[in-house]
Structures are given as structure tokens and as C-alpha cells.
Image (spheres, rainbow, N blue to C red):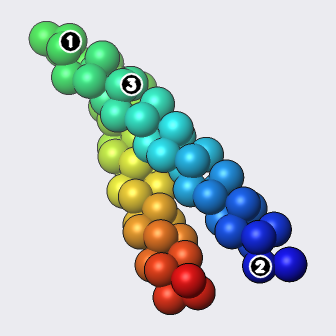
Amino acid sequence: MDEIKDVTLSEEINRLQAEHHRYAQRLEELIQKPYLSEDEQLEEVRLKKLKLHAKDLIYALEHRAAVVA
């Protein structure tokens, strides 16, 4: 039973890390532009929040995994 939880936790961490990476890549694309449209500015703010949220979730899950282990 614990192995199932470990695998699920690990899969969720991997999924969140991939999501975080996608957000970072898109933010990098936006940063490269000399000017951002209004929509792009909103997207940038949204992506920063999503990226931070993903990072917080990753930390929480890693912490939970360490406590359980």
C-alpha cells in the first residue's frame, strides 16, 4: 500500500515539475519580446502565479514524501 502512495506521489511531483518547466519556457519566450501586448502582459502575470503555485505544491509533496519515508 505504501508503495502505491510513493508511486502516486512521485508521479504527481513529476507532473508538477513538467508543468513548472512549461510555464518557465513560456515566460522565457515572453521575456525575449521587446514589447508585450496587453494580453501577453496578463499571460505573464498568470504564468508567474501558476509557476509559483506549482513550485509550492512540489515542495509540499516532497516534504510529505520525506516525512512519510
Q: Say above or below: 30 vs 16.
A: above
Amino acid on which disc 3 is placed: Arg
Horizontal side of 54 relative to 26 (left or right) equals right
Amino acid type, label 1: Lys
Among numbered discs 2 and 1, the one appearing first in the sequence = 2
Residue type at numbered disc 2: Asp
Q: CA distance from mark 1 to mark 3?
A: 11 Å
Residue bearing mark 1? 33
47 and 17: which one is in front? 17
Label 1's element? Answer: loop
Residue in the image at 19% along x and 14% along y:
32
Whole-number angstrom distance, CA of label 2 to CA of label 1: 47 Å
Tell me which numbered mark, 3 or 2, is placed earlier along the sequence. Answer: 2
**Residue holding disc 3:** 26
Q: Position of residue 19 (x, y in %)?
A: 53, 40
In the depicted structure, whether residue 13 falls above or below residue 69: above
Which residue, given by chain and number where applicable, does mark 2 sit on? 2
Q: Residue at x 62, y 58 (%)?
A: 10
Query: Looking at the image, which is closer to me, 22 or 49?
Result: 22
Q: Position of residue 63 (x, y in %)?
A: 45, 78
Q: Is residue 54 left or right of residue 30?
A: right
